[in-house]
Structures are given as C-alpha cells and as structure tokens.
C-alpha cells in the first residue's frame, strides 16, 4: 500500500477487537496455570513462571500477529503500516506527557493497592498463593533476586514494549470509529486482559485508560512505551533491591 495507506480504511470491527484484546490473555493464563505449580514445587519463586510465559508465550504471539498483519498489508513480514500513532513530538513534549502519565498511573495505583489486597483476601482467597506472591515457593532470597533481575528486562522492557505495540500501536488506531470512546474501551479491555491479576482489575483498567488516552491524544505510541516500561522497570528493580537486601516484602 506504500504511501497511500490510510489507517482509517483498515479499521477492525468491535467483535474482532474483543477477540484480539483477549485471546493472548486467555492463552497466557492457561499456560501460566499449567506450569506455575510445577515450577513452584521445584523451588522457583512465583514470579518465575509469570516471566517465562511473558517471554515465551505473550511475546511470540503478539509479534507473530503483528508481522502477519504486516505481510497482509505489505506482502512481506514487516511492521510497516501496522503500527500507527507515531506522530513526531519534541523532547519537551515527551518529557511532559511521560511525567504526566507516570504520575497519573501512580495516583490511581497507590490508593487502589490496599483495595486489591482486600479483594485478594476476601474474593480470590481460593486461588493458590503463587498467583499473587512473586516470592512464594522459595526461601532463597538470592534466587528471588536473580528472578527479579531478569524481570527488569522481561517484565520491565520486553513485555510492556510488545503490549504497547500491540494494544496501542496496532489495535487502538483501528477503533477510530469509536472516536473519543476508543481510548476508554481500548484501555478498559487492556486492563481486563490481565486475567492473572483479577484482584487488581480496578487499577489495571484505569491505568490502561490513562495510557490509551495519552497515546490517543498525542497520536504517539512511544509515550505509552516510555511510561509502561518505566513503571514496570521500577517495580522489578524495587523487588530486586528488596530481595538483595533480604527485606521481607514477599509474604
């Protein structure tokens, strides 16, 4: 399609949008449940299977989907015309909107965190402990620290990069027919796709809407990548430092 490509002529129906937003989460959850108990029984912390599925299931699935779309549009495996919302911004705009996005996500997450814990204890109490505790299954803080160190790269960079390209670089622009509701629906579906964090649905949905709105408003998916990667990296880094110092934050 070359220079004549028009994202508004490549919209995805709402029915397909729902499927595309959820199918990877369903597969992710199935594999996560299948392998987690075994890895925890082998002495690995609860975070290990989550990272493994993120790296070996989520990343290949999303990448394959995007490249196949590139093949459909361009006749070859490429992300050309697949990833939209790549408008140029000044350095000042990147700094401004990245800081706004990270602050907004923290403002949402911090007060909802204890609510998530309450939901975990009172509604999802029947789920195994490894479903919630990244350190569960191992008393070896050195091993936990190593897993969190890997998490800096897998959950801090690779995972959110792939998610942003797929959900906000590929799907969000293709629901432009919803106009101002597009970022709201996209963000909400992104939050709900996190089936492995049901107790945090309020936070993941609101954070998803924040990310989608910023990307939609500035027509720039790189803002979503910066915000998402930074927040996830900080979380993994905090876990790594806590385990390295022997701090009891995992129980």
Image: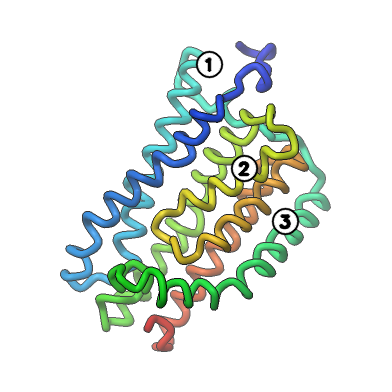
Q: Earlier in the sequence, mark 1 or mark 3?
A: 1
Quarter location, residue 121: bottom left
Real-space Cα distance between discs 1 and 2?
Answer: 25 Å
User: Residue 27: which quarter of the image?
Assistant: top left
Label 1 sits on residue: 73
| Residue shown at the point (62%, 36%) measured from the top left | 172
Vertical position of residue 141 compared to residue 168: above or below: below
Task: Assign a secondary structure to mark 3.
Answer: helix
- Return the mark for residue 185: 2
Question: Where 113 falls versus 78 (above or below)?
Answer: below
User: Is 57 on the left or on the right of 153, as rendered?
Assistant: left
Note whether residue 217 is visible: yes
Q: Look at the numbered disc 1 and give the secondary structure of its residue.
A: helix
Q: Which residue does the image show at 81% across and 50% down from the upper left?
A: 93
Q: Which is nearer the eye, 217 or 138?
A: 217
Mark 3 sits on what residue? Answer: 98
Residue 177's spot in the image, x, y percent?
A: 69, 27
Q: Is residue 47 above or below residue 166?
A: below
Secondary structure beneath label 2: helix
Residue neighbourhood size for the residue with mark 3, other residues' Cα within 10 Å, grouped as few (<14), some (14–19), many (≥20): many
Distance between the alpha carbons at the discs numbered 1 and 3: 31 Å
């Amino acid at each position: 399609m070359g220079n004549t490509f028009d994202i508004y002529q490549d919209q995805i129906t709402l029915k397909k949008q729902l499927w595309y937003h959820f199918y990877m989460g369903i597969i992710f959850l199935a594999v996560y449940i299948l392998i987690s108990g075994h890895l925890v029984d082998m002495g690995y912390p609860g975070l290990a299977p989550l990272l493994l599925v993120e790296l070996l299931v989520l990343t290949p699935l999303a990448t394959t989907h995007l490249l196949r779309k590139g093949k459909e549009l361009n006749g070859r495996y490429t992300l050309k015309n697949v990833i939209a919302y790549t408008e140029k911004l000044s350095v000042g705009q990147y700094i401004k909107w990245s800081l706004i996005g990270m602050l907004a996500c923290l403002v949402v997450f911090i007060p909802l965190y204890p609510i998530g814990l309450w939901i975990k204890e009172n509604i999802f109490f029947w789920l195994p402990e490894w479903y919630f505790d990244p350190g569960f299954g191992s008393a070896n803080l050195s091993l936990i620290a190593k897993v969190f160190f890997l998490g800096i790269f897998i959950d801090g960079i690779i995972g959110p990069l792939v998610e942003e390209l797929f959900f906000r670089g590929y799907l969000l622009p293709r629901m432009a027919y919803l106009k101002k509701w597009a970022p709201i629906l996209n963000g909400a579906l992104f939050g709900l796709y996190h089936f492995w964090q049901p107790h945090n649905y309020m936070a993941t949905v609101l954070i998803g809407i924040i990310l989608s709105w910023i990307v939609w408003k500035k027509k720039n998916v790189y803002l979503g990548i910066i915000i998402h990667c930074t927040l996830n990296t900080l979380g993994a880094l905090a876990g790594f430092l806590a385990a390295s110092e022997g701090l009891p934050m995992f129980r």
